[in-house]
């Protein structure tokens, strides 16, 4: 147990166990398969939110383009599934059998070269990890090496999200346009639309999420994680201590991107389609609010935040569609003004002491980065003179 | 792609697209000026800027309907007081927002971004509830309709010329307010050194509020001008917000000249390419170029030389 204790305090282990219990026991027992599938979809956003905790909460880098990576992962998966669904037999009525239906509708007669490798599942799984990582590396290296950060980084990532959406919608013949890639059926011959498959995918998704949480915990407790928080709070001091600040930032940005992409791929598998409406500015910024509601400093909080906001969104937009946007807007404002540390902040200040006493622990472990720093001091725009 | 056209045709195409680009340029400048004041001078990210613009557009729409119904004789000139009203309405809302929201967040720019995004969602839904989800247009007085023929193939719409003149006047106005007036001097003083500005007797909180309100008011005027060339819907503001932020950053955040230059470059590039490529590809290429240049030169085209 010594190795476990080195990266997980009693509190955090408890948090992980509670999440695992909720995911694997409570939710499957409490919900029918339709609702469970819906919550499985929400959980794919939790990957993005966890990435944002690392990137934004711990590292102070706010990316408004996480939808880009979610989309890249999702589209990679969707391309593979679409190719499998478009066998020459299944698409015999098209003028060019064997290519995806939307290509046929757009008078494309041969499979474009960048679609070819997605015939292979191994390549696809690799691409889900590698493509977003490389993309994030290029953006991150270009920006962080030049010491661009804060607000400027947010605006540029947002612009990239906008560009990718316009590109996907504009290049209908290659990407399926505004409808996205739809009508996905099987994975290696295994029908993903049956109830049984949905259960299995839900559990795979949950297991991946737990794995990601453990991985993030390891990263955060490592020296790298400490450095990350140090960079957020006193970037110059870290630099003067001889560390390369930009590399730390690039790493965490790429890491968050890969997490988002995994979420995107699982999204495609569970929902059965991928469209540009999960890529652009609006979904990207909504993913930030999932993270903020859960608590920007807590990876466990991010999961609950995602579930809560999405559940509220589904419930309210079904019953009072007009009120929902007011509610979401108010949520954005409240989470910034009233409770900047989100659900986990509330938990830390009200519930955690009780839980601690109940468990007989001798006070909380001395953990500097769970104490709530309300202001992110990191975000000084680089072109602004000091006040 | 040029091979199918003769030289005269190409010339006319460039002239016409160039003019269409100039109208886009005017809208960009009007929007970006307000943002350049708020973001460039104060360092505040106002994601609801587009919604302030749309407020101006709806005010103009209401004025046009009211004047048409109750005072048709004034219809020829209603636009001028509609614009003044749009400025006041957006400015007042801006002051209210600064007082209730922004002033708590000056130290946390990223949080301002999220909060103003929330505000923009609320405003959008408010517009939708009040004015309906459909796009609305205003009816223009007669003297703004029609176009001026320049040569046989080139024609210039009058409302476009009006919008450009308006942009020019407002840009000059903003220049005078920022660089030739007492208020502008105080604004710049507060931006450069808040503590010292306070020490010499400037009421920094008041200056903040006025600056924010001024930026929002200009967005209102932009919305008013926008109604002359397009229709207004609850979400129209969001379409422009990314372009506008890119323009301000691309121009160099604290530079008015930079803002205008980058509006010009972006709008011209976009509208000229639009003729030869599809609209979406033109936009993608333009934005990609801007983002690429910003990655190489993060401080933008025109940057102040300051020691950090």
Image: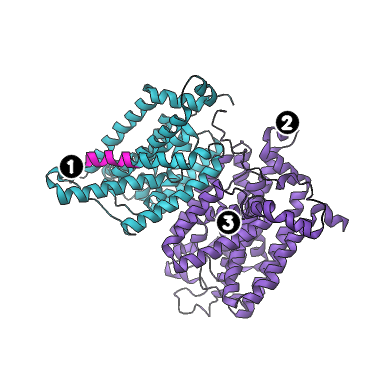
Chain colours: A purple, B cyan
Span colored in magenta? B79-89
Quadrant where the C terminus of chain B lies?
top right
User: Which of the labelled discs sits on residue B166, or is there none?
Assistant: none
User: Are discs 2 and 3 less than 8 Å apart at CB?
Assistant: no
Q: Provide the chain ID for the residue under circle 3.
A: A
Image vertical order of residue A236 relative to residue B245, above or below: above
Q: What percent of the width, then of the height, locates residue A355? A: 74, 58
Q: Main secondary structure of the magenta part?
A: helix
Image vertical order of residue A214 relative to residue B305, above or below: below
**Cα distance in 3D space between marks 1 and 3:** 55 Å
- Report the residue marked by disc 3: A290
Magenta stretch holds residue B74: no
Q: Is residue B258 left or right of residue B132?
A: right
Image vertical order of residue A98 relative to residue A293, above or below: below
Image vertical order of residue B155 relative to residue A116, above or below: above
Q: What percent of the width, then of the height, locates residue A289? A: 56, 54
- Report the residue marked by disc 1: B149
**Cα distance in 3D space between marks 2 and 3:** 35 Å
Q: Is residue A127 left or right of residue B182?
A: right
Query: Which label lies toward us, 1 or 3?
Result: 3
Q: Residue farthest to the top?
A: B200
- Report the residue marked by disc 2: A240
* Residue B130 can be seen in this image: yes
> Residue at (40%, 51%) from the top-left corner?
B123
Q: Is residue A184 left or right of residue A216?
A: left
Q: Looking at the rendering, which quadrant does residue A303 occupy?
A: bottom right
Q: What percent of the width, then of the height, locates residue B137? A: 26, 53
Q: Looking at the rendering, which quadrant does residue A356 occupy?
A: bottom right
> Residue at (44%, 36%) from the top-left corner?
B38
Q: Looking at the rendering, which quadrant does residue A141 occupy?
A: top right
């Amino acid at each position: 147990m010594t190795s476990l204790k080195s990266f997980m305090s009693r509190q955090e282990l408890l948090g992980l166990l509670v999440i695992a219990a909720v995911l694997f026991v409570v939710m499957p027992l409490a919900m029918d398969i339709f609702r469970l599938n819906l919550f499985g979809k929400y959980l794919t956003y939790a990957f993005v939110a966890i990435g944002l905790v690392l990137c934004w909460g711990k590292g102070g880098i706010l990316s408004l383009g996480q939808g880009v990576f979610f989309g890249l992962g999702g589209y990679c998966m969707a391309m593979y599934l679409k190719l499998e669904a478009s066998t020459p037999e299944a698409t015999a009525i098209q003028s060019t059998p064997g290519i995806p239906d939307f290509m046929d509708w757009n008078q494309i007669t041969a499979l474009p070269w960048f679609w070819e490798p997605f015939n292979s599942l191994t390549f696809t799984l690799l691409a889900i990890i590698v493509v977003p990582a490389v993309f994030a590396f290029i953006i991150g290296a270009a920006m962080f090496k030049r010491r661009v950060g804060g607000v400027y980084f947010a605006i540029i990532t947002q612009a990239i999200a906008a560009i990718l959406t316009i590109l996907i919608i504009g290049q209908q013949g290659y990407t399926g346009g505004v409808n996205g890639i739809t009508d996905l059926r099987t994975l290696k011959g295994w029908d993903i639309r049956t109830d049984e498959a949905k259960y299995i995918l839900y559990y795979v998704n949950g297991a991946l999420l737990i794995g990601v949480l453990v991985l993030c915990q390891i990263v955060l407790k490592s020296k790298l994680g400490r450095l990350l928080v140090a960079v957020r709070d006193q970037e110059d001091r870290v630099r003067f201590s001889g560390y390369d600040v930009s590399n730390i930032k690039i790493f965490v940005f790429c890491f968050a991107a890969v997490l988002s992409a995994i979420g995107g791929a699982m999204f495609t598998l569970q929902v059965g389609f991928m469209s540009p409406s999960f890529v652009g500015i609006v979904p990207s910024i909504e993913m930030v609010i999932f993270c903020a509601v859960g608590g920007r400093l807590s990876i466990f909080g991010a999961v609950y935040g995602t579930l809560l906001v999405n559940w509220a969104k589904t419930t309210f937009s079904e019953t009072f569609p007009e009120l929902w946007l007011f509610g979401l807007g108010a949520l954005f404002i409240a989470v910034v003004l009233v409770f900047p540390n989100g659900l986990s902040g509330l938990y830390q200040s009200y519930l955690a002491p009780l839980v601690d006493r109940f468990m007989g622990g001798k006070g909380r472990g001395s953990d500097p980065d769970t104490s709530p720093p309300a202001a992110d001091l990191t975000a000084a725009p680089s072109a602004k003179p000091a006040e | 792609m040029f091979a199918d056209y003769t030289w005269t045709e190409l010339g006319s195409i460039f002239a016409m697209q160039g003019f269409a680009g100039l109208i886009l340029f005017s809208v960009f400048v009007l929007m970006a000026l307000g943002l350049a004041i708020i973001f460039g001078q104060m360092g505040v990210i106002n994601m609801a800027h587009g919604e302030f613009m749309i407020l101006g557009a709806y005010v103009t729409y209401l004025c046009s309907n009211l004047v048409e119904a109750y005072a048709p004789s004034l219809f020829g000139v209603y636009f001028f007081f509609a614009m003044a009203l749009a400025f006041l309405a957006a400015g007042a809302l801006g002051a209210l927002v600064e007082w209730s929201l922004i002033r708590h967040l000056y130290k946390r720019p990223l949080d301002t971004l999220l909060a103003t995004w929330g505000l923009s969602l609320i405003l959008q839904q408010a517009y939708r509830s009040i004015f309906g989800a459909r796009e609305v247009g205003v009816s223009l007085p007669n003297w703004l309709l029609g176009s001026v023929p320049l040569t046989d193939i080139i024609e210039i719409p009058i409302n476009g010329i009006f919008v450009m003149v308006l942009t020019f006047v407002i840009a000059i106005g903003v220049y005078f307010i920022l660089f030739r007036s007492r208020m502008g001097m105080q604004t710049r003083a507060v931006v450069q050194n808040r503590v010292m500005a306070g020490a010499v007797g400037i009421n920094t909180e008041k200056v903040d509020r006025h600056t924010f309100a001024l930026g929002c008011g200009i967005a209102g005027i932009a919305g008013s001008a926008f109604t002359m060339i397009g229709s207004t819907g609850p979400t129209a503001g969001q379409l422009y917000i990314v372009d506008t932020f890119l323009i301000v950053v691309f121009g160099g955040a604290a530079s008015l000249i930079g803002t205008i230059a980058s509006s010009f470059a972006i709008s011209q590039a976009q509208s000229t390419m639009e003729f030869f490529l599809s609209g979406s590809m033109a936009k993608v290429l333009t934005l990609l170029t801007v983002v690429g240049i910003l990655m190489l030169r993060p401080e933008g085209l025109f940057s102040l030389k300051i020691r950090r």
